[in-house]
């Protein structure tokens, strides 16, 4: 059993209770709703808060009791994993493109969580709920690269705080259309659900969540394609993809936010490969965090995957 006491600052005044808890605890809205409706959320004086839509008030303390995870119905599956590091607290993996992180509607099997449950013999943190055991951050299905997963509740809490406080270091590499106007800089713009397409995110002028992405151009090819390194200051859904598209430099192969462009000077072989790719060419090549128990700074790197290096070779 774990207890969290949260203080409501003025910027959260009048926010929905479920949205406030989801943001502060980094739990899914469904998991938070379940906690609220099962009487695990109250004010500091003990008064229960049992309506997900009720508004929170400034200068109040909210106490959340997170019970041990229920037994999971997710089936462990013997799916190969590229394990970069593992101990009793955490496991770090190099996720391939095409592998969904956790089960959801339409994807009950064949996910990273199914593979982890088999590999770790069900020894994963239960804080994230039965559908997301051990998951403290995510990569899109078709984004490849380094991920850390919590094996204990202690590790889960520590890693969640590190991501929340922005003390982790996450770097990505992407192939984008065009050449950015500056060799390095910062992209900002709050991100929210697209008003017309709920599967997409978009940059909004007001509301949404703060999003900050830094970039540095590594190499340019004929003013048509750039290899860019990106660093996340925040971790919003589809953040890098949305920010780059909003700036006019969509990621090559992005089926949701990108659009293939006709290239005049790039080699025919490279252009052919780019047209054949079925995923956004985005790779999480670097991750650093403090070990949840020892405090040691751990860093991990993953080489660019074959689909990206093949195109770079031909460029």
Image (cartoon, grey):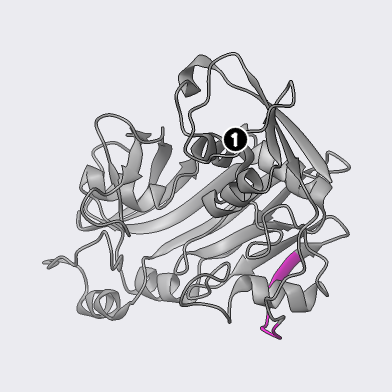
Q: In the image, which residues are magenta?
A: 77-84
82 part of magenta stretch: yes
Q: Which residue is mark 1?
A: 24
**Is 275 above or below relative to 128?**
below
- In the image, 79 versus 265, the foreground residue is 79
Q: Residue at x 24, y 31 (%)?
A: 205
**Is 8 above or below relative to 40?**
above
Q: Point out residue 19 in the picture as x, y percentages from the top left corner.
A: 50, 39
- In the image, 72 versus 89, the foreground residue is 72
**Residue 21 in the figure: left or right of residue 140:** right
**Residue 183 in the figure: left or right of residue 288:** left
Tell me the quarter of the image containing the C terminus.
bottom left
Q: Point out residue 7 in the picture as x, y percentages from the top left corner.
A: 64, 21
Q: Residue at x 31, y 59 (%)?
A: 251
**Is 259 above or below relative to 189?**
below
Q: Point out residue 301 in the picture as x, y percentages from the top left corner.
A: 63, 57
In the figure, residue 289 lies in which quadrant? top right
Q: Point out residue 35 in the picture as x, y percentages from the top left corner.
A: 65, 47
Q: Secondary structure at mark 1?
A: helix
Mark 1: few, some, or many residues within 10 Å (few <14, many ≥20)? Answer: some
In the figure, residue 208 lies in which quadrant? top left
**Is 72 above or below relative to 48?**
below
Residue 177 in view here = yes
**Residue 281 in the figure: left or right of residue 54:** left
């Amino acid at each position: 059993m774990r207890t969290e006491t949260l203080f409501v600052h003025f910027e959260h005044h009048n926010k929905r209770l479920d949205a406030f808890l989801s943001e502060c605890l980094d739990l899914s809205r469904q998991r938070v709703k379940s906690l609220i409706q099962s009487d695990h959320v109250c004010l500091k004086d003990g008064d229960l808060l049992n309506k997900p839509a009720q508004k929170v008030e400034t200068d109040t303390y909210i106490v959340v009791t997170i019970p041990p995870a229920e037994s999971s119905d997710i089936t462990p599956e013997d799916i190969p994993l590229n394990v970069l590091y593992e101990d009793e607290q955490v496991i770090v993996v190099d996720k391939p493109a095409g592998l969904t992180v956790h089960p959801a509607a339409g994807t009950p099997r064949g996910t990273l969580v199914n593979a982890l449950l088999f590999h770790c013999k069900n020894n994963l943190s239960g804080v994230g709920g039965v559908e997301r055991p051990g998951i403290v951050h995510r990569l899109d299905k078709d984004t490849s690269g380094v991920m850390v997963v919590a094996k204990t509740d202690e590790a889960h809490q520590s890693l969640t705080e590190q991501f929340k406080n922005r003390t982790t270091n996450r770097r990505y590499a992407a192939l984008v259309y065009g050449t950015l106007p500056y060799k390095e800089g910062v992209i900002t713009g709050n991100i929210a659900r697209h008003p017309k397409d709920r599967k997409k995110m978009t940059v909004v002028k007001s509301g949404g969540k703060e999003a900050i992405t830094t970039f540095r151009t590594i190499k340019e090819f004929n003013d048509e394609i750039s290899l860019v390194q990106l660093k996340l200051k925040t971790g919003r859904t589809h953040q890098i993809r949305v920010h780059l598209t909003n700036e006019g430099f969509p990621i090559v192969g992005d089926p949701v936010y990108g659009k293939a462009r006709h290239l005049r000077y790039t080699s025919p072989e490279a252009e052919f490969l780019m047209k054949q790719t079925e995923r956004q060419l985005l790779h999480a090549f670097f991750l650093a965090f403090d070990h949840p128990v020892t405090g040691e700074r751990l860093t991990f790197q993953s080489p660019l995957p074959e689909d990206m290096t093949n195109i770079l070779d031909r460029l």
